[in-house]
Image: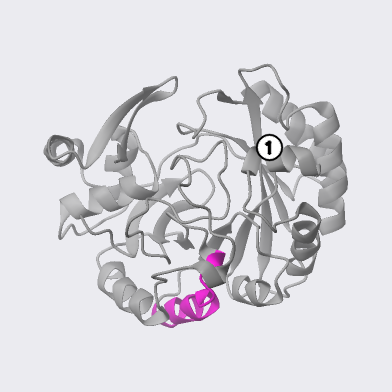
Amino acid sequence: MNSRIVYGPLLSRRLGRSLGVDVIKNAGSKKNCNYDCIYCQLGHVESKLKSPEDVKEAVTPEEVSESFQKFNKDIENLDYTTFSGTCEPSLNLSLGEMVQGIKKISRVPVCVITNSSLVGREDVRKNLAQADLVVATLVSGNENTWRRIHRPAPGIALQEIIEGLRELAKAGAGKKLALEVMFLESETGKPLNSTDEEVEKLVQTIRYICPDEIEVLTVSRPPAEKWVKPVSEERLREIAKRFVSEFGDEKVRLVLKGKNKRGKVLHRDPEEEVYALLLRRPCTFEQTWQGLSMGPGRLSPVLEKLLGEGKIEKIDTETGEYYRAK
């Protein structure tokens, strides 16, 4: 089954109701990235991309605009259009042009979610600066911890990322940089990034970068490594409190499961829409029907058909039963 460039809408803990845009075609691979994160909801990367120049089958700005025009007219009440999905968006060097194209079609704010790996490149920063909001990952200020969590492709260095984020934070009026700090724990007993020492190093690093917002959160979907566990809400609140004491309440956002927002969606191909969503984000039954505004009665036969055809699978986790593309 072919996956569409524009997909969703989906419900995000951070962005509300969002329409997704995927900018690398996933022929032959479920995931196109230069990281192999231990917490990624899409599983492992079969072959890590080293740079944008290694990307094959990159989506073009024209394809994005055409797909967005067709899909956007069927959806109401969006909070964001978000570049994310099965790839790291900044690997496509036409990203800035794509953002500009969507802004000509829609007044909905544009967000890019990035793993921050390429922000040391000036051309990548210029592309990201076209968005209204950039949500950039920063899991640690320590090189060893950062490498253990992200398992990056060769040639990527944490200090270059930190310097690049500092430059991106200066993008100018009307632009916003939010740092996503994903805190994790391990069943193995070996600390990851939620210890007091790691938090203090993050405080020091974030102070140097000077972002507009810091998002404190933990994993909520099945991770790539089964030994990765979410940090308790109590510990997250402690960390958020420490960040607030340093950066102020207006800059720190504790991201927990919240209320869902629904809107109207005209469904032209329910099977393709469900598959496109699950390809980018494993979802529970409730998350799927709420995100797509499809209704439980209409969604059930679609899921059963996709399961029967072997296109998706059902997985049981500590946080619930999820569906994901195979």
What's the residue at 37%, 74% (across, down)?
Answer: 64
The part of the chain drawn in magenta is 90-105
The x, y position of residue 286, in whole percent, is 31, 34
Residue 65 percent location from the top left of the image: 36, 78
Residue 248: percent from left, percent from top: 81, 46
Q: Quadrant of residue 181?
A: top right
Relative placement, left or right, of 286 versus 249 is left
Q: Is residue 109 left or right of residue 157?
A: left
Name the kind of residue labelled 1 in the image.
Arg
- Image spot of residue 170 (x, y percent): 78, 71
Q: Residue at x 79, y 44 (%)?
A: 143
Instruction: Report the residue marked by disc 1.
Output: 148
Q: Which quadrant holds residue 160?
A: bottom right
Viewer-proximal residue among 46 and 272: 46
Front residue of 31/14: it is 31
Any magenta on residue 97? yes
Q: Count residues near mark 1 (Cα–Cα under 10 Å), then give few for <14, some for 14-19, many for 20+.
A: few
Please name whichever residue, 139 or 69, is drawn nearer the observer in this view of the structure: 139
Magenta: main secondary structure: helix
User: Which residue appears at 50% of the width and 43% of the height?
Assistant: 13
